[in-house]
């Protein structure tokens, strides 16, 4: 399969030959006419034959022209080959005919064979030009021989035959010379053309390679372009992200500054540790009040996860006392109370320790906030002091009244009637209530001032129980309450302050009797577990409404329900009891159902 380049070249040369033929066919005609009419020339070449030959030749050339147009579209190599051979072949035939009519050996038309040979060289290269020259030689020499030996009739060029025709050796000498020239021209032109073909081929290959290379480069360029575009896109995306991040950072830094500003302007101390327990943030108040130093920033404050105040002594240089608060809060690591002296003035703080967590709940550290309670404490203290003074002032006259009434009732100061005795007894009872209230108030202020002295020792719990029950016996009988005291075990000795635990037992039993209606039931049960002794006082009384259960151990709290019943009470009994039990290292709890009864349980130590 010839490649497209060769086909295109052949089409071009065929076109060139067709174009040239218009010209030299006409030139041959003109030449023929000239020799016929203006020179001393052939009379034997009839004008009609000349015209027919010319027209035929032109017609054939026209067919070639059409054929070539078809091939130009078709690009068929076979058609092209046919056309090429026919171009050369028909020309040889035409030339041989012209040569015959213009005198055979006498003719000078031979020179036109060069056109065919060169044409063949242009189309087919050396192979074509050589075969055409050989064919031409055969035709030229064959014609000379055929005419000489009369195989073909001789059409004389002149009126008389020339030596060219009459002497074979002369005729042949001319035709053989021409043939030799044919072959030389064929070789030269064919070889030259072949060389050009090769060059063309080489050029073609190089062009192809170059094209391929260019294509590759173009492809690479395109890819590069795409990559570049992608990079530009990424770059702008990245820029956007960076800008957004910067904004976010600015915002968060803004927030941070705001937070820091709030913290540093906060009038109470704040200390923040990071997740490695190193000092991260503290405020001005921390410096002024607690003596935290700037040089401690980044210092490891403590190991482990005990964040109680004494661990902070590594960074707090101020001298302070602290205690764990009884308050509890699930969200915090703990609440402590702290007091210290600033310029000889006492300051009180409630210290809340809580975890610091980020947006994703990641642990960031721990924060200690110190709430200044000095004012509240001072007011509280003043209140307590007032109560103490008032209670003290009341206690002596109340004792005097008790003594006086008692004296009158016992009729030591003359006879009085039954009605008077009854009135005096009522007065005595009221006075007793007043004394109890004053005692409770004094106990509360002692508790709050830390003056509620304890005297621990080993005592039989049975003695304490006996006294408490004895004091209530009359009321129990009056209210027809069934008192059940568990007798399964012998009650142990306990390590307590006898008076204080007596107070607790008295209070709880008192409540059980007070808040249990006529004909009710009170059960006392006991349990020993390890070093602890558990006491349970269960009644079938009015119970405690759920809404009141939380406030039960607060100072002065009395449920609405009992207030309506107008039973006696101060609302201080359970507050005092809880404080006493805590000082004994125990705890007090209760469970209650409204209308069904309540159970109070506390525990104390068996040994020291
Ligand atoms: P009070 O002097 O009022 O008894 P307490 O501190 O002893 O003061 O008790 C506080 C409140 O708790 C009582 O007023 C009462 O409302 C409730 N309470 C205590 N014990 C009982 C109980 N056994 N049954 C029902 N309510 C009780």
Image (spheres, grey):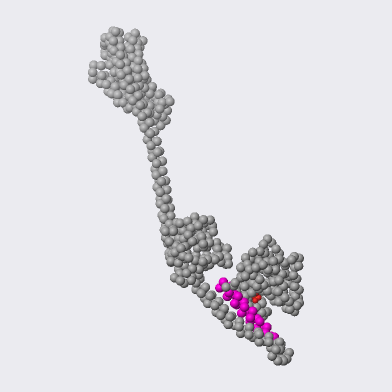
In the rendering, at what x and y percent does residue 338 appear? 51, 67
Q: Is residue 159 above or below residue 213?
A: above
Residue 299's x, y, as percent?
45, 56
Ligand 1 positioned in quadrant: bottom right
Q: Is residue 551 visible?
A: no
What residue is rendered at 64% in x and 70% in y?
A: 497
Compare residues 81 and 512 and report the one nearer the observer.
512
Q: Residue furthest left?
A: 39
Q: Quadrant of residue 530?
A: bottom right
Q: Is residue 544 left or right of residue 392?
A: right
Q: Which residue is at a point 75% across and 73% down the rendered structure image?
A: 483
606, 6: nearer the viewer: 606
- Judging depth in this view, the residue of 150 and 82 nearest the camera is 82
Identify which residue is drawn at 49% across, 66% down. 320
Which is more toward the observer, 589 or 246?
Answer: 589
State whether residue 497 is above or below residue 276: below
Could you say where residue 479 lies in the image, as x and y percent from the top left? 74, 78
Find out whether residue 445 is within the magenta segment.
yes
Position of the C terminus, as image quadrant, is: bottom right
Give percent across and percent down for residue 545: 66, 72
Query: Which of the 4 image quadrants contains residue 254?
Result: bottom left
Asked if residue 89 shows in the view, the reply is yes
**Up-down: is 563 above or below 124?**
below
Residue at the spot 56% in from the left edge and 80% down from the top edge: 389
Residue range corresponding to the magenta coloring: 425-450
* Magenta stretch, overall SS: helix
| Left or right placement of residue 474 versus residue 65 in this view | right
Q: Is residue 283 magenta?
A: no
Left or right: where 297 falls relative to 53? right
């Amino acid at each position: 399969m010839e490649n497209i380049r060769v086909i295109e070249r052949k089409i071009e040369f065929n076109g060139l030959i067709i174009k040239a033929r218009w010209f030299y066919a006409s030139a041959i005609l003109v030449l023929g006419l000239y020799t016929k009419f203006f020179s001393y020339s052939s009379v034997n070449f009839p004008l009609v034959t000349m015209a027919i030959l010319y027209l035929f030749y032109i017609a054939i050339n026209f067919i070639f022209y059409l054929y070539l147009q078809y091939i130009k579209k078709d690009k068929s190599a076979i058609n092209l080959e046919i056309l090429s051979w026919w171009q050369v072949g028909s020309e040889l035939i035409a030339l041989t005919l012209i040569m015959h009519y213009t005198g055979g050996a006498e003719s000078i038309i031979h020179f036109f064979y060069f056109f065919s040979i060169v044409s063949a060289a242009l189309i087919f290269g050396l192979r074509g030009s050589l075969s055409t020259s050989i064919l031409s030689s055969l035709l030229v020499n064959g014609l000379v021989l055929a005419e000489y030996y009369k195989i073909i009739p001789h059409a004389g060029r002149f009126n008389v035959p020339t030596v060219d025709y009459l002497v074979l050796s002369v005729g042949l000498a001319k035709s053989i010379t021409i043939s030799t020239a044919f072959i030389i021209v064929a070789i030269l032109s064919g070889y030259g053309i072949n060389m050009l073909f090769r060059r063309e081929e080489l050029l073609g290959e190089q062009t192809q390679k170059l094209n391929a290379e260019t294509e590759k480069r173009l492809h690479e360029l395109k890819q590069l372009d795409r990559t570049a575009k992608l990079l530009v896109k990424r770059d702008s995306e990245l820029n956007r992200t960076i800008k957004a991040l910067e904004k976010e950072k600015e915002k968060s830094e803004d927030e941070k500054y705001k937070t820091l500003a709030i913290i540093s302007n906060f009038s109470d101390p704040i200390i923040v540790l990071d997740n490695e327990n190193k000092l991260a943030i503290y405020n001005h108040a921390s410096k002024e009040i607690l003596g935290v130093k700037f040089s401690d920033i980044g210092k490891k404050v403590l190991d482990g996860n005990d964040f109680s105040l004494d661990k902070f002594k590594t960074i707090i240089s101020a001298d302070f006392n602290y205690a764990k608060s009884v308050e509890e809060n699930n969200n915090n690591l703990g609440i402590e109370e702290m007091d210290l002296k600033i310029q000889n003035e006492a300051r009180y703080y409630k210290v809340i320790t809580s975890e610091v967590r980020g947006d994703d709940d990641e642990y960031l550290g721990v924060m200690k906030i110190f709430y200044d309670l000095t004012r509240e404490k001072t007011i509280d203290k003043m209140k307590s002091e007032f109560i103490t003074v008032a209670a003290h002032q009341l206690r002596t006259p109340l004792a005097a009244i008790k003594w006086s009434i008692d004296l009158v009732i016992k009729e030591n100061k003359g006879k009085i009637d039954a009605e008077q005795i009854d009135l005096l007894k009522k007065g005595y009872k009221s006075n007793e209530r007043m004394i109890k209230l004053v005692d409770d108030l004094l106990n509360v202020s002692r508790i709050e001032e830390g003056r509620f002295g304890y005297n621990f020792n080993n005592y039989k719990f049975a003695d304490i129980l006996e006294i408490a029950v004895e004091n209530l016996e009359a009321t129990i009988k009056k209210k027809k309450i069934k008192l059940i005291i568990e007798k399964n075990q012998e009650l142990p000795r306990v390590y307590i302050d006898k008076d204080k635990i007596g107070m607790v037992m008295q209070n709880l039993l008192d409540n059980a009797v007070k808040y249990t209606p006529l004909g009710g039931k009170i059960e006392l049960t006991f349990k020993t577990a390890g070093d602890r002794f558990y006491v349970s006082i269960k009644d079938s009384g009015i119970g405690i409404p759920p809404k009141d259960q939380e406030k039960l151990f607060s100072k002065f709290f009395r449920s609405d329900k009992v207030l309506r019943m107008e039973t006696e009470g101060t609302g201080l009994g359970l507050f005092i009891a809880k404080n006493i039990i805590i000082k004994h290292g125990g705890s007090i709890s209760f469970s209650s159902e409204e209308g069904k009864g309540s159970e109070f349980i506390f525990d104390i130590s068996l040994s020291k």
